[in-house]
Amino acid sequence: MATELTELKQHTRQTFVKPAVKEIAITTQIIDAIFNFYPKECYCLAGYLDTSDQFWKVNYHFDLLVTKIDEFLEIKDLDQKYYNAAKAIENVLFQNTPIPLTGYMLDSKVGQTKDLSTNEQIIARHKLIKQSKIDFKSVITKSKVVTAAKESNPPKAEKMWWLAVAPLAAPGTSLHGTGYALDIAGNNLETTRISKALGASLVFNEASHVHVEFKNWKDLL
């Protein structure tokens, strides 16, 4: 494992892993094996998510997406066609809203804000969010709100825009539920390079962060 890499030892475990990250035994073993290889600017922002956490994550992305659409609608001298497109996307999202409407993206830990919606309502909401992310991604790229290529390491000012339009697994299906998937933020290019060298089974640059899977996690031990 990591034969061509040198342990940088720029992190302690506490500096690499954000407080909100949840772990099971697999997650803990993976993090313990890899954190010393990443530079200081890279950090783990998500790990294990059970099914309940994944339902909460749908509402987090709803909250974030609506927040970024509202921010977009306030841009000075915005072309009317982009304004209309963004407003139409928001109107679709408001067909199925969490109860309460907001608070999820400000939670200090996963699942803190409780939604009164049924699981069936949240599953239907995920479908609206999935298409709305695709539509809003087109709007922010064509209007040049984001300028960096998705596969690069976007500037900090653009990363939340990219997170708002990042793919979102349906609740109950995310591989974060296995314990071997991590989200690592900071320097996406370095995260990608190092994770591949560590033997990650999947590395997916989502622009806002990198989704990394260590399906063969026992090889790290």
Image (spheres, rainbow, N blue to C red):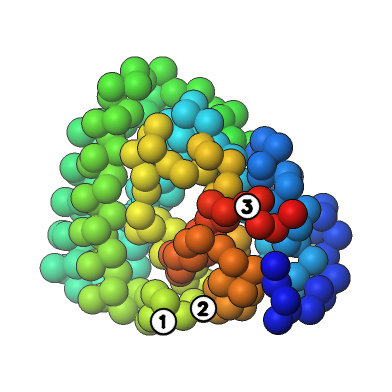
Marks 3 and 1, the one that precedes in the sequence:
1
Image disc number at residue 148: 1
Task: Identify the amino acid type marked 1.
Answer: Ala
Q: Nearer the viewer, mark 2 or mark 1?
A: 2
The reply, left or right, for residue 150 in relation to residue 114 is left
Q: Quadrant of the N terminus?
A: bottom right
| Amino acid at pointer 2 | Asn
Distance between mark 2 and mark 1 Cα atoms = 8 Å
Q: Is 55 or 85 nearer to us in this picture?
A: 55
Q: Earlier in the sequence, mark 2 or mark 1?
A: 1
Q: Position of residue 60 (x, y in %)?
A: 46, 41
In the displayed structure, 142 sits above or below 221; it is below
| Residue occupying the point 28% across, 24% down | 121
Q: How many marks?
A: 3
Q: Quadrant of the C terminus?
A: bottom right
Measured in 3D between alpha carbons, the distance from the residue under mark 3 to the one under mark 1, in whole angstroms, is 32 Å
Q: Residues within 10 Å of mark 3 (few under 14, many from 20)?
A: some
Q: Nearer the viewer, mark 3 or mark 1?
A: 3
Please tell me which residue lies in front, 12 or 103.
Answer: 12
